[in-house]
Image (cartoon, grey):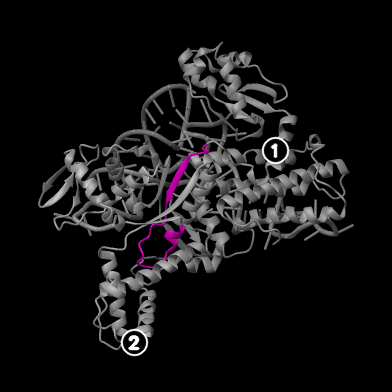
Amino acid sequence: MKNYLLSIFKEAESEIPALKEISLAFEKPKVAEHGDISTNAAMLLSKKLKNNPRVIAQQIVNSLKIDQKVISKTEIAGPGFINFFFTKEYVTYIIKKILDKKERFGKSERYAGKKANVEFVSANPTGPLTVGHGRNAVVGDTFANILEWVGYTVDREYYFNNAGRQMRVLGDSVKLRYLEIIGEQISFPEDYYQGEYIKEIAMHLYIKYGDSLKNESPEGIFKDTAENEIFFDIKKSLENLGIVHKIFFNEYSLYQEGKMDELLNYFKVHNLTYEKDGAVWLKLKELGQPEDKVIVKSTGEPTYRLPDIAYHAVKINRGYDLLIDIFGSDHSATYPDVMAGIKAIGLDSDKVKVMIQQFVTITDGNEVVKMSTRKANYITLDELNNEVGKDAVRYFFNMYNINSHMVFDLSIAKKKSDENPVFYVQYAHARINSILNRVKEAHLEISTNNLDLLVHDDEQNLIKTLFQFEEEVELSFEGLGTHRICSYLYELAAAYHRFNKSCRILGTETKLAEARLALSYAAMIVIKNGLSILGVSAPEEM
RNA sequence: GCGCCCGUAGCUCAAUUGGAUAGAGCAUCAGCCUUCUAAGCUGAGGGUUAGUGGUUCGAGUCCACUCGGGCGUACCA
């Protein structure tokens, strides 16, 4: 529809050349009285043409060559909006399109042939995934789905570092617990990993090796075993949510393949570094950042900025058209440095989009559950998943703008009732399925022959809500978010439940009943498609 | 102190990226099942969008300042 309007506005440029100078936008008005689609073009032009927007709107309308089969009415309203009303033929065409495209309805070819990469989770293997990682994981995977829906081929990637200080502390923590098990007196430092899982890993080692490891270095078998077991569990936690990464990228490979030296050398050759206090500094000020930063410490070890830049360079050089990073808010101050670094080596940093994930607060009713990886009192993603189930986990994490703090209330997610939005949406799907089964006994068929009988307000509203789906996917993509898919599905489910109440099928005259069946089936398809983007199941019965 | 993010109904969140009367759910109150799942529907109350200025046809959205919260602000990642 937008394409159609764009094309007739394009034609009108010959009469109103100023139309070329504005960015033409169409949107669905909030209120039905304002039409099915609307544009503010006249208001944008009023400044340029120095004329009353309503007068300009009238000129625009006069110069549009409108197909009466598509648009039934055009009006000028408010300060100068031009509102368009669809014809019934066009509205029924939407149902036919849905029934025809089925599981492909809502997909677009807009970015067909383009490649995207989504990097998410990227937790180092020092402990089980927490609910915070869960939010990152769910939104990352769902956004990857959205990219696929607009046409991209997507690689899901996990970046990790199994060297460095954190991993040393991990090995030390496991060894201490091991020594504890074999009966040695230990004192366990506060800044070591406190979780029970450390004791479990130590116990596994004890079961397998007895006390023969007491003289082994913590950096060896203790660290390696911990890493393997933890990574195994992380992957399993993700799989339980339907998430599988295609690529696991080890930061260490950047060193092995010489990418770090290459990058550092590039910076040096291009005079972007200097030495101070025995460290190498990157001239970030020259690159538009507020402060220069150390990239190689006086110990010779690089800081995280260097591998991060090298890593992004490697990814960009793989040929992606779009790269998405999903970072925790603790990275929010540092990624601009990385972007500046990428730009400095001549790569297109505009291809990289960053989604900053804010924190998750877990409540159980009124009680706030505090979380820290180091301390023992956190909820793991597995615990959350076991408690509320995959569908609720995925729906709840997707439901909020990732850029806002969110409260995950366990007591609501656990409820199998109308307080829980995921059940409300799934129930609409199950309800339609149940109807489709029921009408078979009444010998009714889904038919698109008499869709023009669907004139009830609740029918029209449902159809127009269905039509909105394609745009919601696009808007989710453009807005770098998943939450509007949830809002949309909730709205769609509500529109269906209302229709279901006012527009019965059994006991209605056959032609109308069969048209309503077609509409119901179309609604079922769209709900299922939307849920599949979220990675939430569409149950046939509940 | 400085930087980034945030502040919307009692609570949890939306608001088509500057558009028309700021919307949903929960909670509260009042209704609806001899009819395809009441896991549903209908209605009511609840707002100076933290505050003050500014930008313009038009601001929850942009700018400045103030207040409040989160995260950074390391030669940790």
In this image, A374 relative to A3: left or right? left
Tag 1, which secondary structure?
Answer: helix
Residue matched to label 1 = A97
Camera-near label (1 vs 2) is 2
For label 2, the crowd category at 10 Å Cα-Cα, with few meaning under 14, some 14 to 19 and many 20 or more, is: some
In this image, A535 relative to A282: left or right? right
CA separation in Å, label 1 and label 2: 67 Å
Measuring 44% from the left and 68% from the top, which residue is drawn there? A233
Please, what is the dominant secondary structure of the magenta stretch? loop
What subunit carries mark 2?
A
What subunit carries mark 1?
A
Q: Is residue A308 magenta?
A: no
Q: Report the front residue among A226 and B68.
A: A226
Residue matched to label 2 = A210
For label 1, the crowd category at 10 Å Cα-Cα, with few meaning under 14, some 14 to 19 and many 20 or more, is: few
- The kind of residue tagged 1 is Lys
Residue extending furthest toward the left? A277
How far across and down, in percent of the image, does residue A109 sit?
56, 37
Per the rendering, the mark at residue A249 is none
Q: Which residues are magenta?
A: A111-135
Q: Is residue A115 magenta?
A: yes
Can you tell which quarter of the image residue A71 is in? top right
How far across and down, in percent of the image, does residue A78 sit?
59, 24
Q: Report the front residue among A534 and A44.
A: A534
Q: Is residue A379 visible?
A: no
How far across and down, in percent of the image, does residue A464 sit?
67, 37
The quarter of the rendered structure image containing the N terminus of chain A is top right
